[in-house]
């Protein structure tokens, strides 16, 4: 596989790899490092990529595994929580603050989910993969992916209702 073929296969998935790494590692800097490391590993093993049916699925699986390894490492304690900024023109300051708080709360709730549910939410709701594709990446049956996603969404919904009804606990 030459450089042009390699770039043709991996460049379209660069943003997806970064977003998954960011979801798992939280820190933008850590996600950038992870993305760079993953593409370096893919480049080193470019000759083997042709044996995979989906380079994208392989790359996403590698990203997940790499991020889990990073989280388990000693450096995981250095990761910092960085919240997304939400901006919308023509919206009152109070509404912007409420939206930022809601977005921040959802990110926090997702990050508190078990690792598998966190990955499934990222792959399904953010990256928009099909259940079958997620199942292949995570070595799960599509039915198990659906159940896990449903439980994750239910947990987030219950926590959001609790927070909005009773205030921050």
Image: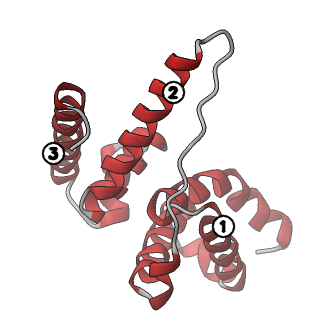
- Say whether marks 3 and 1 touch (CB < 8 Å): no
Q: What residue did someone put label 3 on?
A: 151
Q: Is residue 147 left or right of residue 48?
A: left
Quarter where residue 48 is shown: bottom right
Is residue 128 at all visible to an observer of this figure?
no
Quarter where residue 114 is shown: bottom left
Q: Please give the name of the residue rendered at 33% of the width and 52% of the height, measured from the top-left corner.
A: 120
- Say whether marks 2 and 1 touch (CB < 8 Å): no
Q: Earlier in the sequence, mark 3 or mark 1?
A: 1
Q: Is residue 109 left or right of residue 127?
A: left
Is residue 149 at all visible to an observer of this figure?
yes
Q: Which of marks 2 and 1 is in front?
A: 2
Q: Please give the name of the residue rendered at 76% of the width and 57% of the height, measured from the top-left corner.
A: 8
Name the quadrant of the N terminus: bottom right
Q: What residue did someone put label 1 on?
A: 29
Q: Which of marks 2 and 3 is in front?
A: 2
Q: Earlier in the sequence, mark 2 or mark 3?
A: 2
Q: Is residue 161 above or below residue 65?
A: above
Cα distance in 3D space between marks 2 and 1: 25 Å
The local secondary structure at tag 2 comes to: helix
Q: Is residue 60 above or below residue 121?
A: below
Few, some or many residues within 10 Å of mark 1 (<14, 14–19, 20+): few
Q: Which residue lies furthest to the bottom in this view?
A: 74
Q: In this view, does 14 lie above or below 59?
A: above
Q: Nearer the viewer, residue 92 or 25?
A: 92
In the rendering, which numbered label is found on residue 97? 2
Q: Which of marks 2 and 1 is nearer the N terminus?
A: 1
x, y percent for residue 102: 40, 32
Q: Which of 29 and 90 is in front in this view?
A: 90
Few, some or many residues within 10 Å of mark 3 (<14, 14–19, 20+): some
Cα distance in 3D space between marks 2 and 3: 29 Å
Q: In this view, does 127 lie above or below 90?
A: below
């Amino acid at each position: 596989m030459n450089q042009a073929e390699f770039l043709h296969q991996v460049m379209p998935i660069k943003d997806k790899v970064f977003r998954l790494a960011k979801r798992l590692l939280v820190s933008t800097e850590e996600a950038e490092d992870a993305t760079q490391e993953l593409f370096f590993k893919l480049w080193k093993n470019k000759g083997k990529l042709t044996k995979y049916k989906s380079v994208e699925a392989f790359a996403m699986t590698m990203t997940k595994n790499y991020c889990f390894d990073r989280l388990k490492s000693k450096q995981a304690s250095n990761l910092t929580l960085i919240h997304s900024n939400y901006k919308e023109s023509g919206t009152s300051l109070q509404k912007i603050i409420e939206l930022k708080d809601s977005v921040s709360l959802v990110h926090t709730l997702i990050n508190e989910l078990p690792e598998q549910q966190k990955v499934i939410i990222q792959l399904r709701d953010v990256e928009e993969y099909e259940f079958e594709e997620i199942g292949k990446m995570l070595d799960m049956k599509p039915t198990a992916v659906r159940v896990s996603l449903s439980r994750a969404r239910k947990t987030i919904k219950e926590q959001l209702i609790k927070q909005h009804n009773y205030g921050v606990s």
